[in-house]
Amino acid sequence: MITLSNVSKTYHLTGTKSRLPFAARRRDTPPRTIEALKSVDLHVPQGSIHGVIGLSGAGKSTLIRCVNLLERPSSGSVVVDGQEMTDLSATELNQARHRIGMIFQHFNLLTTRNVFDNVALPLELMGLKRGAIRERVLPLLELTGLADKARQFPAQLSGGQKQRVAIARALASEPRVLLCDEATSALDPQTTGSILTLLREINQKLGLTILLITHEMEVVKSICHRVSLISDGELVEEAEVGDFFTAPRTRLGREFLNDFLQLEPPKALVERLEEEPGEHTHPVVRLAFSGDAVSTPLISRLARECGVDVSILQAKVESIQERTLGLMIAELLGSPEQTCRAIDYLETHDLHVEVLGHVQRDD
Amino acid sequence: MSSAMIDLILQATLDTLYMVAVSGVISALFGVPLGVMLYVTRPRQILARPVLNQVLGMVTNIGRSIPFIILMVAIIPFTRLVVGTSIGTNAAIVPLTLAAIPFVARLVEGALNEIPPGLVEAAQSMGATPHQIITKVLLPEARGGIITGLTITIVTLVSYSAMAGAVGGGGLGDLGIRYGYNRFNPTIMLITVAILVVMVQGFQSLGDTLVRKSDRK
């Protein structure tokens, strides 16, 4: 439904250049450029929810704005619903944008229009008649739980309600695609939850394809099917959400995950961690397991079959949509042969094992 | 006070109101579109035309920098061309309007500048044309600010109209100068000032009420 191929966006900072005094301008200083996106490839299939996560300034906003050409890519191709966006004329582009809804972090509702008229705006832009507009707006207010708020103005609404209005407005033109630009970043956790639930409902009921950008793992965890990790204008990792939470492949991915799960080995231990195993060291491992492994008493079996003792430093069970994910940081106590065998054992039972380091034995 | 004097004051009040009303309406008709142009042709705006923007900005600044009293006499040939005479109330309306247009334009531009850029971006994402963005987003959202600007303009026009006497335009300011100041009649002076104060208060309250009604923030 959305395919970005080799999309790059470079900003030339001519503004700063022209502010220089005339003499300085003539010198051959190369114009400053910023590469906001570096040949990004992204494919979002029909009906799926794809998340792009990254830190501030990583290029998330530019990426999502390239989909509906609020930002025109410097190079590359953007295909939405089979249409090459970069080839369209101004009029065609406006037509195409009717099929792409977008919601924003700060809602961007018109303050001088009430809820009904805000939702009606895209339909007015399309030139629909008053009656037809009513027929479309009312069901959307029902869907988003705003039926009793139709005559209120945005200033009278809470943040969550404003985002609901924005969602209803984005859906008014019956788009095939919904772009969410940090849609829950300005909301408290509870409201975030209710907005995400609404987005999931829309995805399921209307079969709408959703591309969202966020810096919150919670958003990815609760509604995304797939996730891409963006860093410094590049997509560095892409995975199914379950896989990403079990075993991110990049360092940045692990940082995001650890930050989200708050699953770090205790500070005192981190200071003692050594990269290479020594003569009297034990490995400290991070275990991630999902599916059957969650309900199997693996730790006690490990102790019996490999003869190692397991000291659990931290553990957590997370539900990632339909999957249950167990996470654990543990110290494996035993001889080097025993601990090696233990790690093999765990891996053969579909656990993801990451050796964080080695600590000296206390005794 | 003689009834002739009262008639004079009444006539002067009507003259002032007439000059302010006509020049106010015409300057709004030209100034609001000019203000919109100044805003939408800025770089990175919906109808970015940097060169046109520079030219418009320069013309506006020139218009705003000429002292009104000089403008009034300097454009006498133009005034004659437009209203057929260079003397009288109608002749005063031409320079008043000309002075007010760039004033309105800058205030409108300022009001538009207060609109969060996200609103325009949202409208663009819905496939709005620049024309639709102006009529359905920019102007309605800036309505409060524009009314505030027009109120300021009207009040400024009341004070500018006091100089209309220079071209025989009449009005309260002219009356105050000729009968109050030149003929040492402090009563007339006070009365004209009092009427002007009431007039300004009236316009300001009217403007404030309209702003309150249009603002939903």
Image (cartoon, coloured by chain):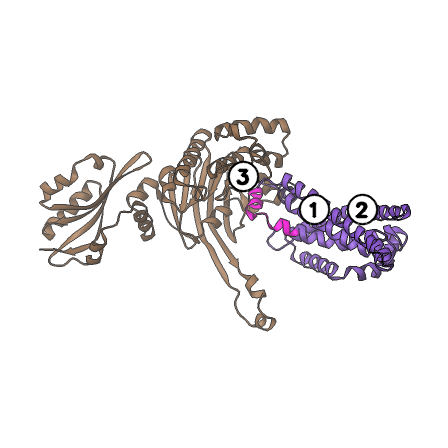
Chain colours: A brown, B purple
**Mark 1 residue type:** Gln
Q: Nearer the viewer, mark 3 or mark 1?
A: 1
Dot 1 alpha-carbon crowd within 10 angstroms: few under 14, some 14 to 19, many 20 or more: some
Q: Nearer the viewer, mark 3 or mark 2?
A: 2
Residue A176 in view in this figure: no
**Mark 2 residue type:** Leu
Percent of width and height locating residue A108: 53, 42
Q: Is residue A94 magenta?
A: no
Give the letter of the chain under mark 3: A
Q: Quadrant of the C terminus of chain B?
A: top right
Percent of width and height locating residue A204: 42, 31
Q: Nearer the viewer, residue A242 or A181?
A: A181
Asked if residue B151 is positioned above or below residue B64 in the image, the reply reads above
Give the letter of the chain under mark 1: B
Q: Main secondary structure of the magenta part?
A: helix
Residue under numbered circle 3: A155
Q: In the drawing, what numbered circle is on residue A230?
A: none
Distance from label 3 to label 1 (Cα)? 26 Å
Magenta highlight range: B109-126
Residue at horizontal 84%, vertical 60%?
Answer: B73
Q: In the drawing, what numbered circle is on residue B204?
A: 1
**Mark 3 residue type:** Ala
Q: Are marks 1 and 2 on the same chain?
A: yes
Q: In the drawing, what numbered circle is on residue B17?
A: 2
Residue at horizontal 53%, vertical 49%?
Answer: A71
Q: Is residue B181 left or right of residue B199?
A: right
Q: Is residue A112 left or right of residue B32?
A: left
Give the letter of the chain under mark 2: B
Asked if residue A333 is positioned above or below residue A117 in the image, the reply reads below
